Structures are given as C-alpha cells and as structure tokens.
Image (cartoon, rainbow, N blue to C red):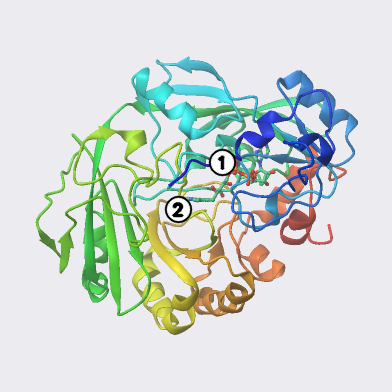
Amino acid sequence: MKKRTFLKLAGAVGAEAILPPVARLGAKNKVPEKLKNWAGNIEYSTESLYAAKSVEEVKSYVAKTRRLKVLGTRHCFNTIADSKDAFLSLKPMEEVVALDATAKRVTADAGVTYGRLAPYLHEKGFALHNLASLPHISVAGACSTGTHGSGEKNGNLSTAASGLEIVTASGDVVVLSRKKDGDKFSGAVVGLGALGAITKATLEIQPTFMARQWVYENMPMEALKAHFDEIEAAGYSVSLFTDWRNKNVNEVWIKERIGGAKQFEAKAEWFGAKLAKKNLHPIAELGAENCTEQMGVPGPWYERLPHFKMGFTPSAGKELQSEFFVPRKDAVEAIFAVEKLHEKISPHLLITEIRTIAADDLWLSPCYQRDSVAIHFTWQQDWPAVKTVLPDIEKTLSPFGVRPHWGKLFTMEPAVLRSRYKRLPEFVELAKKYDPQGKFRNEFLNAYIFGNQ
Ligand SMILES: Cc1cc2nc3c(=O)[nH]c(=O)nc-3n(C[C@H](O)[C@H](O)[C@H](O)COP(=O)(O)OP(=O)(O)OC[C@H]3O[C@@H](n4cnc5c(N)ncnc54)[C@H](O)[C@@H]3O)c2cc1C
C-alpha cells in the first residue's frame, strides 16, 4: 500500500502568515485542496492555517487571534478539531526538549508524533507504557482526546502525561504538573483543546523492552462468555477483531512483553482459534505489509504495540470510526448485546476491535474511575448508513453508562454525554479560568462540553 503524503500539508505552511487556499496550490492551474481530516470525511470550516515554529510564535498568534482551534495530526473523525475561524498547527514543533533518565520522564514539543518520539526513546534505553493502533498521531492530540491502546493493566496514553506547558487565551504560558497541581492536572490532561495550546508535554517513561505478537484466527465468540478474563490476561495488550458475522472472533492479537512476568505459550490452537501462519491485517482481505511484524518475531516495543507501521497507511484509509467505552465488568454482556445487532452492523462494517483499558483519574477520560472495555467500529465510508446504525448501538450500550470516544463518530445527545462525566462541571470552570471568552471553543465543544454556559 502506498505511503500517505498529505500529512506534510500542515508543515508546508510557513510560520509567517495565515495562508489563503490559493497559497496551497501545488501545480499551476490545480484546484486548491480543501483542508480535511485524515479520513477525508470532514472538510474543515476554514482554510486559515497558521503553523507555529516556537512558543513565542504560538503566544503572539494566540494573543492576536479572536478565536482559533489547535490542530494536531487531524486523525479525529468528528468535528472536535474543526474551526470556523482559524487553525493553529504545531506540526513544526516536534523536538524532544529534555530526557530525565533518573526521574524517568521525557519532555517534548507537543506537535511531536509517537512515530518520531518512540524510536528516540528506544535508542536512549526507554519506552512509553503503551501506544495506540498507529504511531502517526501527535502526542498532544492523543492526550487531549483520551486516545488508548489495549491491555487491562494499561491506562490510556494520556495517563503517561505528568506535565503540560499551555499557552492560554491571554497568550500567557502556564505550566501544570501532576506533582504540583494534582487534581487540577487530572482535569487538564484530556482537555479536548479547550484550555489552550499545549506547547510541551512531559511523559513518564520506563526502561525499554522488546515485544512480540501472535495472531489467532476464528475464535468462537462463545469462548468469551467463560474465558474473557483469561483471554484478556494472556498478553500485555490483547485485541479482539470481529465482523460480527457467525458469532466469530475473526482475529485475536496478543502482544507479549518479552521478559515480562508471564510469557504466552503460543499453542497451535487456543480456545478454539488457530494460530495464524502468516502476518495478517485486522481486515483480513487487506495485505499485511502495513502491519507490524507478527508470528512471534521479537522487536522493540514501538514496532509491536501499534498494529500499523509508521510510514504506511494505518487501518483501511477510506473509512469512518466509532468507539464506545463500557465498564470492564460488563464486557461480555455488552459484547453479546451488540452481537444481537449484527444484521444492522455488518453490512456497513470493515471490522470491529475490542480492547481493554485500565481505569484512570483524568476527569474527561472515557475510562475515568472505571476499568473499561472499548468496542470500536471501523466503518465503510458511508455516513448516511452509519448514522442510522449508531443510535441502535448507543441505545444498546446505554444501560452500561456508555461513553463515546471523543475523536470518533457518535450520535448521542449532548446532555446524555455530559451526564456520563461527573467532573464535567469542574472541567468547564477550569477551561473558563484559562479561556474566559471561549477563544479555543468550537461548535463541538460548545455543544458537548459547555452547553449554554
Ligand atoms: C487510522 C486511525 C487509527 C486510530 N486508532 C486509534 C486507537 O488505536 N486508539 C484511539 O484511542 N484512537 C485512535 N484513533 C483516533 C485518533 O487518533 C485520536 O483520537 C487522536 O486525537 C488523534 O490525534 P491528532 O493529533 O490527530 O488530533 P486532532 O484530530 O488534530 O485534534 C484532536 C483534538 O486535540 C486538540 N489538540 C491537538 N493538538 C493540540 C495542542 N497542541 N494543544 C491543544 N489541543 C490540541 C484539537 O484541538 C482537537 O480538539 C485513530 C484514528 C485513525 C485515523
């Protein structure tokens, strides 16, 4: 599969000006490319994009701009990152600022991607606790939306954050840390971009490690009823992939930490599933060349924890995504409740992924104070069809207090969503403290976070 090139777009814009669409004209007479998200399903509402190269540039741009949204790597599927007024990209700010080997923490410019940060850390002898399915995303965007990988003992990626440098609406620089600010810091981390422009993030690190992954094919879904806990505990990170057809789990990916407390014994058959004999893509019809190495081949953590390799298209490319978090204790009941909708879901689906995530204390994290299971849907890019199925899934998962992924597609009413986050009123106050006039708000935030406030 071909490498994607459009991630270069934001970086191609100079730091001196907000460029009109015509400035992005490539070849002569070419129609200007509209600014879109990664999947291309959202055409952003403005073409004004300013790319800052330093904190000073961020400060001066923020101070003189009435309303703006900070843009990461544009991998969200909904309008959370959209703006009608102006965008600030921190893509040129992607360097590691400090590595403290003793305190085990790294501070980096917030525009850095995991794909850039992770090899650096490994080379220095360190690792992050987990990664998402892809390394292409920015640290700031991922932490701001509660992005996660899998592993019942692994918190989402935001839980690694121990410090943030933020340029607030006034153009001032505020530094928050877990140590100094405690609970307030927990409010700021999954901040949805509402507190200001994060210019640096400090993340906790640990000694580097090697990992390997095994893939099993065709596990009868029934096996989850009696063995869900055992299956999830089999690896450092476990993902179940299903198309919901024939009560079958199409693939089970087990990511094992080499030298960890418990090693996985890769038998030819496991809970009715067969050990794969070649590398697989989660969507079995697609070739595995953009996927990380499987078949038990050892490799550094950052080349095994994500499913997809840096430099290659992650997932399918032309797709939509939704994801719903329910308490881990309700996992099996929730999975089988969704299974009952298979006739509605499967015709529009590319694949579902089921992952576990440890509870955390971050106010707007979908895993706030509950160990969670996340049921994810990679859809065909057909929003009219998908939006008719989502309400059924949300209704089915409603008894479990479902929370949708902040960066993916959902149809839940704003008031319902707000009711699922008990610290949301405090978050609103925190955001107002740093952004009293709503400079960093957009329609998404106004609807789902601030309501009429
Ligand atoms: C193929 C694919 C696979 C994915 N896999 C996963 C997965 O495994 N797990 C998962 O949880 N999600 C996954 N996602 C969803 C997505 O990656 C995340 O939700 C993440 O937010 C994307 O980060 P971004 O930098 O692209 O953010 P953007 O979409 O650019 O922005 C998201 C939000 O973060 C804010 N933001 C970004 N940078 C800053 C900053 N510097 N300061 C303040 N606010 C900022 C924006 O204002 C916006 O509100 C996937 C997406 C795709 C396309």
Q: Is residue 58 above or below residue 186?
A: above
Q: What's the mark number on residue 143? A: 1
Query: Left or right of 151: which side holds 274?
Result: left
Residue with the most extreme front position: 29
Number of other residues with Cα within 10 Å of mark 2, as a class: few under 14, some 14 to 19, many 20 or more: many
Residue 2, given in percent of the width and then of the height, sits at 47, 44
Residue 361, given in percent of the width and then of the height, sits at 52, 47
Q: Of 331 and 112, which appears nearest the observer? A: 112
Q: Is mark 2 within 8 Å of ligand 1?
A: yes
Q: What's the mark number on residue 315? A: 2
Number of other residues with Cα within 10 Å of mark 1, as a class: few under 14, some 14 to 19, many 20 or more: many
Q: Separation of disc 2 and disc 1 at Cα?
A: 20 Å
Q: Of 140 and 3, which appears nearest the observer? A: 3
Secondary structure state at the residue bearing disc 1: helix
Query: Left or right of 206: which side holds 222?
Result: left
Name the residue type under label 1: Cys
Image quadrant in which you'd find residue 13? top right
